[in-house]
Image (cartoon, rainbow, N blue to C red):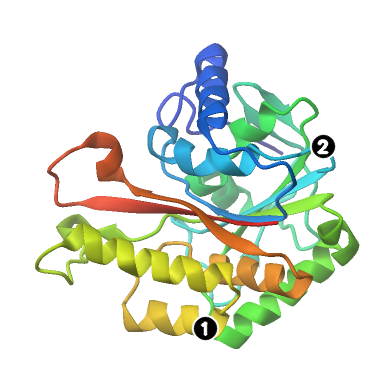
Amino acid sequence: MIRTAYYAGSWYPSDPHALKSLVEDSIAQATHFDGAYRFAVLPHAGLFYSKDGIAPFFASDFSAVRRVVIISPSHYTNLGSNVLASAPLGGCETPLGTLKSENFSFADPRSFSAVQSEHALEMVLPYIATLSDPPAVSLALFSHVSDAPHAHTMAKRLISELGETALREGHTVVVASSDFTHYGPRFGYTPYRSQAHQRVKEDDLALSTMLSEGKIEEAYAFCVSHHSTVCGCSISMVVASMALQIGAKGKVASYYTSTDITHSPDPNFVAYSTILWS
């Protein structure tokens, strides 16, 4: 089964030349890192919005990377608590070529439609396809964690699945796909009567810092107490725990909102935070 580029032409350009230009221009404008990143939390909105948050991850050394693992929340298929789902894929199509797939041991053909329809898995793929020697990709969906200990448990499971040596040596890198706070009446989330953008930024940067520092218990409590609309908060906690267990050092590399892109007075906006571990 091949995963098609379902969102090409709507969420990002389907024309190869336009897409390659978008990707390369965003990477050129990002802050470049001489080393290699091991783990990341990256946004997954349409590339008009998310490119500035995705690009910093790819402005680093990918020469040793042989596998990129992308795990996202499931927006369209209901999964139970603490569940990882994946499908056996023969490749992932992009307008820039078909990427090789490396499948998880738990891949199940019954999950193919969920993996195919999930936009949060697709936005990073064009960036991988622009690399001179594109690594294989592994795609999975994750539900919400029931508590902080389960985030650590799932992290240990993924480390075992992917191989600790491959993670430590940077042959395998892991991306948690997550947008941050969704604010406004459209999202049913309006806790602040004034200075909403500033208050949301404070919340998101506080959560991002907790994740970057591996403070999983604090991050979980924060998301619960704030009724967080960060869509990938659970998988972000799992990946942050993986980074903690491997000994990677994290940082908040980027933060902005959709309003910063559109300059619109719309009361509804989505925030994007990029967290990187080296």
Where does the image place residue 29, in percent across and percent down from the top left?
Answer: 51, 30
Give neighbour class at mark 1: few <14, some 14-19, many 20+ (Cα, 10 Å).
few
Secondary structure under tag 1 reads loop
Q: Say which residue appears at 25% left-offset and 43% top-offset.
A: 259
Most extreme residue toward the right is 165
Q: Is residue 51 above or below residue 253?
A: above
Tag 1 residue: 146
Q: Please report whichever mark, 2 or 1, sits nearer to the chain's N-terminal start.
A: 2
Marking on residue 63: 2
Three-letter code for the amino acid on which mark 2 is drawn: Ser
Question: Marks 2 and 1, Cα distance to the nearest angstrom?
Answer: 37 Å
Whether residue 214 is visible to the viewer of this picture, yes or no, is yes
Most extreme residue toward the left is 193
Where does the image place residue 194, in percent across and percent down from the top left?
Answer: 10, 65
Tag 2 near tag 1, CB within 8 Å: no
Q: As drawn, is 189 to the left or to the right of 208? A: left
